[in-house]
Amino acid sequence: MFAHLSYDVAHLIGATVLMAGFGLLYQRRLQAVLNTFAFQALALAAAAGWQAHVQNAPHLWATAGIALVFKALLVPFALHWLVERLGIHRTVETALSIGWTMIVGVALVALSIMLVLPVTAGAAALTRESLALAMSVVLLGLLMMITRHNAVTQVVGFMALENGLILAAVSAKGMPLVVEISIAFSVLVAMILFGIFFFRIRERFDSLDVQYLETFRGDRQ
Amino acid sequence: MISYVAALSHTANPLLWILGSPLAGAALLALLPRWRAAAIVNVVVSGVTLAAALTLFQHRPAPTRLLFIDDFNIYLVALTAFVGFTTSVFSAAYIARETAARRLRPVHLRFYHSMYQAFLFTMLLALSANNTGVMWVAVEAATLTTVLMVSLYRTREAIEAAWKYFILCSVGIGLALFGTILVYLAAEPVMGDGADAMAWTLLIGRAAAFQPDLLNLAFVFVLVGYGTKVGLAPLHAWLPDAHAEGPTPISAVLSGLLLNVALYALLRFKMLIAANGHTLAPGPLMVMMGLSSLFLAGFMLYRRGDIKRLFAYSSIEHMGVITFTFGMGGAVANFAGLMHMTMHSLTKSAIFFAVGIISQNAGTKRIADIRGLTVSHPFLGWTFLLAVLAIAGLPPMGVFMSEFLVVSSTFARQPLLALPLALGLLLAFGALVSRVQGMAFGTPLAAAGHGRPSPMANAMAYAPLSAHMVLVVVAGLYLPPVLVSWFQTVAKLLG
């Protein structure tokens, strides 16, 4: 009875993280993207907390705490501030229309389910489903990084990808070093935000649009 | 100094010294405000690390859950410590000249020296970690420290290069973590929960019982993830920019060390796959990525106008050759791959030392503005020419030996694959020779170099270059039996 409940709740929270991943692809305004990301991080914190409870692994509470404080509160707040401070465009610039992005996203989820479920036949059901969900979140984050021009949305895409990784790590039964890994990622993200602010990428490149980076090859003869 | 550290190592694990000194050095250098003193401390700390690394050959510590030294990583640790040390010497001379020309400010240098030691620490940790997760964290931290050093000049180009490097490698590292988690999941049913299922020394013995499908999926993620850091096409986009825009000593350690470390991570996972025996063969994937890197770099070499970019593409080419070689597998090919890794590391960092001096003398990185080096600076010009010919694969230097072994062993087993390999090598050879001709010969242009180096700085700039080139030439003519037997032992391990 309890095994069923723990499985269902983990599944539900994992699916919420995935839905937030789709939500990120759907937003047209930068503020909304940041709020959706905060929601995804909140769901991730819940997932980590639930796993800490189910697996009886106290160190996962630390991971949940990092997700809650750093990702769901500090990072969105800092990004809102950055967007304000650097006067970044409020609309999301897309390389692929939102409709097509959603279709590709659905295909990616189908792909990861078809890929993960057969190969994990031996693993616990809890791990199997969560892994399929986590891989979908990773691929959606990657899709977001590819199809959005703006550097802030790319960073959000990277953090969504990272949320998927942490989801996979907390679902892997008894995996050590999860806390260290989430700290390492937090340092990485903090550095990225610091980089945007410190180098005033907007001033330097006139825009955070990564397309501007492509004009430079520094290598014309 | 070696005997002193050796005496200490009887009481302590030498790995603590190898990892502890760069870590302590990083902290110390962050506090040191004067850059001249910092450059000296940097050299001393790197020297201590090298001495500690050399004691590993006398006394190999027993593996722990966190760290281990085996036949495979012992030479890579030594090589990393060695190139780290020579580069720190070169860096002192390079930095003195850049500061004199007011291209770098002291406040940046404090940061640079601290990051240099932090970078050495992360690479040595990645090499000696006995845990897939710790290795991952170390490679991730290596990315962070190098990004900070690549952006050191604060120019638009440098920041752009750092940003591109950061984003691409972060994604690569992320995918590598997913692969690492999948390997844990494959190991967990057999090894039980916890750190045992992540320890290389324990995993390899029981890999045969892991679920092969899960390992297959894991290897794809690991190959794409760590492959990004190796600079394999089509994931190489960060590499030329990061090499070209950072300070030259960093280009030398990026090419000479970081790419090797990423490849080492990949090869460790390949060893697991090979030990399992029921998975898909990882070889064809690696062969394909290797060949595409070789060809892409071979063609790109012809159109380069920037001297550092030229050699960055040459690094992609060589990493492609090495990945191809390990993909072929077998005793001879693995032998050649290990040798190529060592020789490329020594030769390429020597080339970047020379390029650093050349671009400081000429005041530019444009190949078109560099001419007649053998006339204007005979020693530098001829050494540079020798180094470029060595990397292009001309006998009798070390790279020729390993390339010859690769091509001949491929001909013996898969003649159809040998053809594109030989073609790619010739392509790159032609490009490098045609490029270096213009730079080495002809009438020198009036140079607007920055900074006039003191004789001491000059000696410090030339010494590492000469040391590397002597090793490369000697290795081509005579490979010590101890090295040969090591290569053979590890070649067997790699399967």
Image (cartoon, helix red, strand yellow):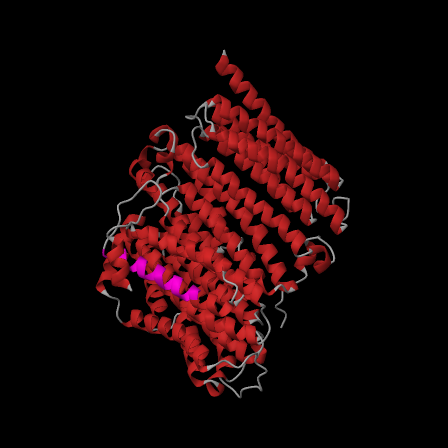
Q: What percent of the width, then of the height, locates residue B21?
A: 38, 56
Q: Quadrant of residue A177?
A: top left
Q: Is A111 above or below relative to B310?
A: above
Is residue B486 visible to us here? no
Main structural element of the magenta stretch: helix, strand or loop?
helix
Is residue B143 visible to us here? yes
In the image, A76 versus B327, the foreground residue is A76
**Magenta-tinted stretch:** B41-58
Residue B221 colored in magenta in the image: no
Residue lying at 51% horizontally and 64% vertically, measured from the top left: B312
Q: Quadrant of residue B425?
A: bottom left
Q: Is B80 above or below relative to B363?
A: above
Quadrant where the N terminus of chain B is found in the figure: bottom left
Residue A154 lies left or right of residue B175; in this view the side is right
Q: Is B136 above or below relative to B252?
A: above
Q: Quadrant of residue B214?
A: top left
Q: What percent of the width, then of the height, locates residue A117?
A: 49, 28
Residue lying at 58% horizontally and 30% vertically, measured from the top left: A45
In the image, B254 versus A77, the foreground residue is A77
